[in-house]
Image (spheres, coloured by chain):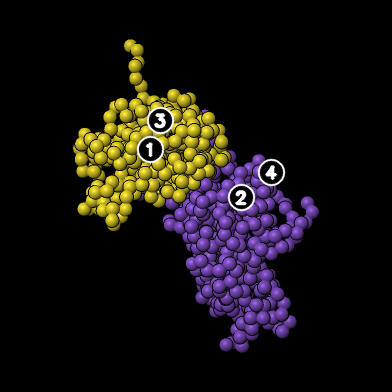
């Protein structure tokens, strides 16, 4: 298929349609409005249904209904709207339903701003809503990667019956890059025999989409089942990119938009003799801890540096991975500001000089 | 011997957990009988609320979803958009629908969502132990209005049926009561009509069923039905509020 220049939000929407998503429920919020707008135009052309909900709360509950009814379904929002969806995400996780959720993150807290941020990492990876649950969190660094992740995200969601979150940001949503739409590697997906479709086929059990278990032993058993599933996902679906690690003395950890800036900084740093490399988590949950464990054990590695558009959220997971074996420094900007390549190089210089 | 009565096939054999004298059991039966008589049981998909009817998914013998508190109309919307030929219904109480779920029910009605809502109004939060609801009568005692609902402090009962009847998307809205047999029979007719409204794709349909809560009202089942007739019905006038 020919490459096409597309805005991130529109490319994400088209990727969902190409992946077979036929239902979208959303609510307007900047900087992701092009997703529902694109869906409103495109879904009727492919026999699907776009519906603008009265709130993010309603939108995610429409997703719960549509997913339980067996459909491929998506919703999108940005930070304050994603906070509102957390109740529904917990129910979807508890009822083991598949769906794809997009968060084009903006700076917070509260109403925050509309510039790109990475300040929703904790919310995305550490629960967000109530209860012992996880969702798969994919972090694209380009529009092409966002497209690929959305398309594969629907398969991951269906394979494991789990919500998949695409954690982009205002930059990923708003910038334009050339993309092509290629189907992901084929997976053997189980039929949705659990879906509520009307109980005309009495050979299957009556469908009950539910997360309520009054008996503590039943609820614990259900939780143990979830934890088992999460372990399998961690084994099968963890994704990470390693770049220029072979001779690296300094290893930068960065994901999404800021990893692009770090990549430019690496070239400058190396031109002045600072041998630095990059570990870029592509899945934030499951987090590629092993990549950091292994890198920390490498000879010649002096220290790590986490660079984020936040106060240091992924930084905590990087430190857990490195596990005290090497120092882990931090550089971040907040409020919708983006660390510059120069500031990254400057930080590396300081680290080299032992400041 | 000729069998003159049998339990509807649209209820499972699970024994209801409802309190003695509660009318949820009767309302469940009316809904189930309506689905059976209309011959739509195998394409019915129900949505249970949070509240006393939280276990409705164990009682209705069709595919069911359990929704978060107040969100049943949004969940039903998602289901109905995926399966337009299914007969989708929500079964909700007054705390669920008229407090936390007010936005969801109003917008489902405004969209003319082709679903049927059974709204059971007993003027109190039952499951959580008798707290004040938006539908609690002025002066009525609850655990969170121990001296009775004081209008100057926490306002007035919400009349959901009248409110929804103002919306163009609402095709059929009726309020009925459970206080005697004649009214139970009227309720059955209303519930059946509300499902027919959906099957004929006329728009959103809701039946508000005034119901008793002997446990949390602190009354015997018989006294509770009298309170329902003498106190609730005057505040919540019965009848068809909208039919198109």
Viewer-nearest residue: B24 or A92? B24
| Label placed on residue B208 | 1
Query: Disc 2 or disc 3, which is closer to the eye?
Result: 3
Residues at discs 1 and 4 in contact (Cβ within 8 Å): no
Q: CA distance from mark 2 to mark 1?
A: 40 Å
* Chain letter of the purple region: A
First-in-chain label (3 vs 1):
3
What residue do we see at 44% from left, 36% from top? B242
Q: Secondary structure at mark 1?
A: strand
Instruction: Please name which of the two marks, 4 or 2, marks the residue nearer to the observer.
Output: 4
Which residue reaches farthest right? A2
The chain letter for the residue carrying disc 1 is: B
Residue lying at 45% horizontally and 42% vertically, measured from the top left: B166
Asked if one can make out residue A198 in the rendered structure from this viewpoint, the answer is no
Chain for numbered disc 3:
B
Rendered shade, chain B: yellow
**Which disc is residue B190 wearing?**
3
Question: Same chain for the residues at labels 1 and 4, yes or no?
Answer: no
In the rendered structure, find residue A45 and report the number of the disc placed on it.
Answer: 4
Mark 4–mark 2 Cα distance, whole angstroms, equals 20 Å
Q: Which mark is residue A302?
A: none
The span from disc 2 to disc 3 (Cα, nearest Å) is 42 Å
Q: Secondary structure at mark 4?
A: helix
Which residue is label 2 attached to? Answer: A154
The quarter holding residue A173 reads bottom right
User: Measuring 51% from the left and 30% from the top, which residue is drawn there?
Assistant: B199
In this orientation, does residue A169 appear?
yes
Using the numbered discs, state the Cα–Cα distance from disc 3 to disc 1 in whole angstroms. 9 Å
């Amino acid at each position: 298929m020919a490459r096409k220049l597309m805005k991130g939000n529109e490319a994400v929407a088209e990727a969902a349609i190409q992946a077979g998503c036929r239902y979208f429920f959303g609510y307007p919020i900047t900087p992701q409005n092009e997703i529902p707008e694109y869906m409103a135009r495109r879904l009727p052309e492919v026999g699907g249904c776009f519906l603008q909900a009265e709130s993010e709360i309603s939108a995610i509950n429409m997703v719960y209904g549509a997913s339980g009814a067996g459909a491929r379904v998506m919703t999108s929002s940005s930070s304050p709207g994603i906070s509102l969806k957390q109740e529904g995400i917990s129910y979807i996780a508890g009822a083991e339903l598949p769906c794809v959720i997009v968060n084009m993150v903006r700076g917070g807290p509260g109403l925050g701003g509309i510039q790109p941020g990475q300040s929703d990492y904790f919310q995305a990876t550490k629960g967000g809503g109530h209860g012992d649950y996880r969702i798969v969190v994919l972090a694209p660094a380009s529009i092409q990667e966002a497209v690929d992740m959305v398309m594969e995200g629907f398969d991951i969601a269906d394979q494991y019956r789990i919500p998949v979150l695409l954690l982009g940001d205002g930059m990923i949503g708003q910038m334009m890059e050339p993309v092509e739409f290629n189907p992901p590697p084929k997976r053997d997906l189980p039929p949705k025999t659990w879906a509520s479709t009307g109980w005309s086929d009495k050979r299957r059990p009556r469908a009950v989409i539910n997360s309520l278990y009054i008996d503590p032993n039943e609820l614990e058993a259900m939780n143990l089942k979830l934890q088992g599933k999460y372990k399998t996902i961690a084994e099968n679906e963890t994704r990470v990119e390693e770049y220029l690690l072979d001779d690296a003395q300094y290893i930068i950890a960065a994901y999404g938009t800021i990893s692009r800036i770090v990549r430019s900084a690496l070239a400058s740093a190396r031109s002045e003799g600072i041998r630095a490399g990059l570990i870029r988590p592509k899945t934030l949950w499951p987090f590629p801890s092993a990549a950091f464990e292994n890198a920390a054990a490498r000879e010649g590695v002096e220290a790590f540096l986490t660079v984020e558009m936040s106060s240091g959220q992924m930084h905590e997971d990087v430190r857990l991975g490195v596990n005290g074996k090497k120092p882990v420094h931090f550089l971040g900007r907040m409020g919708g500001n983006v660390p510059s390549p120069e500031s990254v190089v400057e930080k590396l210089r300081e680290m080299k000089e032992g400041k | 011997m000729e069998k003159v009565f049998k339990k509807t096939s649209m209820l499972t054999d699970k024994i209801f957990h409802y309190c003695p004298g509660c009318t949820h059991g009767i309302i469940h039966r009316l809904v189930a009988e309506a689905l059976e008589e209309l011959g739509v049981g195998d394409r019915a998909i129900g949505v249970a609320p949070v509240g006393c009817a939280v276990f409705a998914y164990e009682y209705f013998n069709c595919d069911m979803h359990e929704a978060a508190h107040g969100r049943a109309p949004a969940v039903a919307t998602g289901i109905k958009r995926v399966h337009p030929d299914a007969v989708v219904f929500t079964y909700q109480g007054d705390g669920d629908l008229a407090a936390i779920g007010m936005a969801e029910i109003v917008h489902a009605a405004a969209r003319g969502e082709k679903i049927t809502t059974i709204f059971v109004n007993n003027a109190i939060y039952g499951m959580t132990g008798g707290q004040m609801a938006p539908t609690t009568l002025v002066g009525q005692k609850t655990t969170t209005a121990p001296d009775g609902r004081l209008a100057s402090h926490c306002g007035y009962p919400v009349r959901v049926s009248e409110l929804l009847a103002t919306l163009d998307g609402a095709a059929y809205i009726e309020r009925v009561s459970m206080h005697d047999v004649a009214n139970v029979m009227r309720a059955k007719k209303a519930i059946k009509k509300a499902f027919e409204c959906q099957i004929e794709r006329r728009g959103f349909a809701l039946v508000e069923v005034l119901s008793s809560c002997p446990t949390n009202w602190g009354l015997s089942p018989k006294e509770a039905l009298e309170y329902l007739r003498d106190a609730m019905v005057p505040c919540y006038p019965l009848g068809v509020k909208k039919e198109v």
